[in-house]
Amino acid sequence: MPYVNVKITREGATAAQKAEIIAGVTDLLVKVLDKDPATTFVLIDEVELEDWGVGGVPTLEYRRRREG
């Protein structure tokens, strides 16, 4: 009974996009590990940008550095 927690930044992912993520993750577990989709759980957490960091800095600062 797999449980997968996907965390994304809160930047306007639509319900359709989230449904596609759920379907894709489930399909991957079925194909790779032969898991039963009926008992495969996928949870999507949306995290505010100020609560997410990359490379030791908040996400917005990280993006600014990469752009500039």
Image: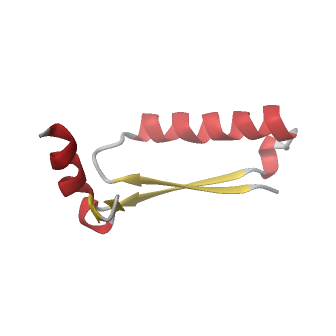
67 lies left or right of 37:
left
The residue at the point 16 percent across, 38 percent down is 67
Q: How is the image coloured?
A: secondary structure
Decide: is 50 above or below 4.
below
Image quadrant in which the C terminus is located:
top left
Image quadrant in which the N terminus is located:
bottom right
x and y percentages locating residue 23 in the rendered image? 62, 36
Q: Residue furthest bottom?
A: 51
Count up the numbered dots.
0
Q: Name the one closer to the observer, 26 or 15.
A: 26
x and y percentages locating residue 65 in the rendered image? 18, 48
Q: Residue furthest right?
A: 34
x and y percentages locating residue 58 in the rendered image? 25, 63
Q: Name the one closer to the observer, 24 or 32.
A: 32
The residue at the point 80 percent across, 31 percent down is 31
x and y percentages locating residue 62 in the rendered image? 24, 52
Quarter of the image where one finds residue 53:
bottom left
The residue at the point 35 percent across, 53 percent down is 9
4 lies left or right of 20:
right
The residue at the point 59 percent across, 42 percent down is 22
Q: Name the one closer to the observer, 30 or 49.
A: 49
